Amino acid sequence: MALTILCAPTHVMPQQIDMPVLKDAKGGGAMAARRKWPRGLSSWELAVPGTQELLDPILGLLEYAQGDTPIYFDGAGFGEMTSPILLFIGDGVTTDITLPHRFWSISATVIYTSGGVDTGWLPLANDMTWMDSIRMAVPPAVNAIITGKSRRKVKCLLRVEDKPERQRQFRSFSGGNLANIHGLRFFLDEIAV
């Protein structure tokens, strides 16, 4: 069963991306030139205004999730690559390319080889809608630039260390209407699994 909650945040604070390298825990923690994760992980702070009746379903979802149930988020505009991004630099041998993000939309993906559209690829690790890697029909030539663009969904957890905050932002007395305008602020962290 899937639940869909729609909201229109007044702002989404800048997307923060964590791309750590390995550190040695001994002797001052020397950095190693190795990635800790194969992909960067993002986090967002969302501030959503609205009446109490409109915010209750969102708060209900957050209370249900409680930081251990995944929430799928559209990235609030950061989940769509509108210009091709670098995926791989050809080595003449490799055909399987891990995408920089999980849950790429198969139907919205366009792959380019050295600037031209390339249709010789297949989705890997997918459920026929989303994928996290591709297989090229022919290994890209040495130094060929493989780029791509798509939409993605982001698998997140509610960050419980920074507690969700519900507040009353404004109360309108115009026209005899005592409409309460509330706000909800919370953080989502992308997860790797």
Image (cartoon, rainbow, N blue to C red):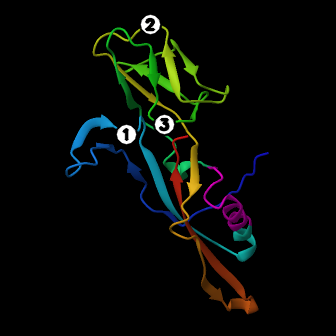
> Callout 3: 10 Å neighbours few (<14), some, many (20+)?
some
User: Residue 150 in magenta?
Assistant: no
Q: Residue furthest right?
A: 1
Residue 85: x and y in percent read 39, 33
Label 1 sits on what residue type?
Lys
Judge left or right: residue 189 versus residue 4. left
For residue 101, the mark is 3
- Would you identify the image quadrant in which residue 87 lies? top left
Q: Earlier in the sequence, mark 2 or mark 1?
A: 1
- Magenta segment, prevailing SS (helix, strand or loop): helix
- Number of labels in the image equals 3
Q: Say what secondary structure mark 3 lies in.
A: loop
Q: Say what secondary structure mark 2 lies in.
A: loop
Q: Residue furthest front?
A: 26
Q: What residue is pinned by disc 1?
A: 36
- Would you identify the image quadrant in which residue 184 lies? bottom right
For residue 138, the mark is 2
Label 3 sits on what residue type?
His
Quadrant where the N terminus lies? top right
* Nearest-to-viewer mark from 2 and 1: 1
Residue 73: x and y in percent read 60, 50
Q: What residue range appears in magenta?
A: 57-71
Pick the front one: 190 or 81: 190
Q: Residue at x 68, y 90 (%)?
A: 174
Quadrant where the C terminus lies? top right
Q: Earlier in the sequence, mark 3 or mark 1?
A: 1
Q: With respect to residue 192, does 110 lie above or below?
A: above
Residue 31: x and y in percent read 23, 43
Q: Residue at x 38, y 49 (%)?
A: 18
* Nearest-to-viewer mark from 3 and 1: 1
